Image (tube, rainbow, N blue to C red):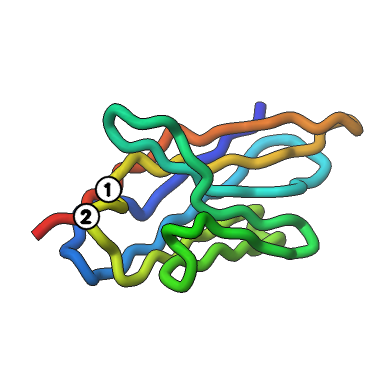
Amino acid sequence: QVRLVESGGGLVQPGGSLRLSCAASGSFDSINAMAWYRQAPGQQRELVAAITSGPSTNYADSVKGRFTISRDNAKNTVYLQMNSLKPEDTAVYYCNAHIVRKRREYNYWGQGTQVTVSS
């Protein structure tokens, strides 16, 4: 069974930084694209940043220049470095990964980690 486990969320003041981590565990062949999404109360889940196995990256316009996504393939882990945080970044952040098992690709989600930006 494949699991994605996130860590690193918490409460931070505006202008502060946080680093989220998401580690994949279990039995699988490889990991293709990985991404971070977020969902604020009363809003739809939105893509924050994504990284391919290439790796190439893309970001939501709202986080460009402030957030950086990266991955460590040896650790099956994706990171999201969040700088210059704003109150509007407050949300539950979810890790997403496209994982190959027995030559088929499956889409997995983590359980989510809360990020709160407030003074």
In this view, the residue in front, 109 or 45, is 45
Residue 43: where, in percent of width, then height? 35, 31
Judging from the image, what secondary structure is the residue with disc 1 in?
loop
Residue type at mark 2: give it: Pro
| Residue that mark 2 sits on | 87
In this view, the residue in front, 64 or 111, is 64
In this view, the residue in front, 99 or 15, is 15
Judging from the image, what secondary structure is the residue with disc 2 in?
helix
Mark 1 → mark 2, Cα distance in angstroms: 6 Å
Outermost residue, left direction? 119
Residue plotted at (58% across, 40% down): 96
Residue plotted at (23% across, 71% down): 15
Compared with 86, 65 (above or below) is below
Residue contact between numbered discs 1 and 2, judged by CB atoms under 8 Å: yes
Residue 93: where, in percent of width, then height? 40, 43
Residue 24: where, in percent of width, then height? 61, 44
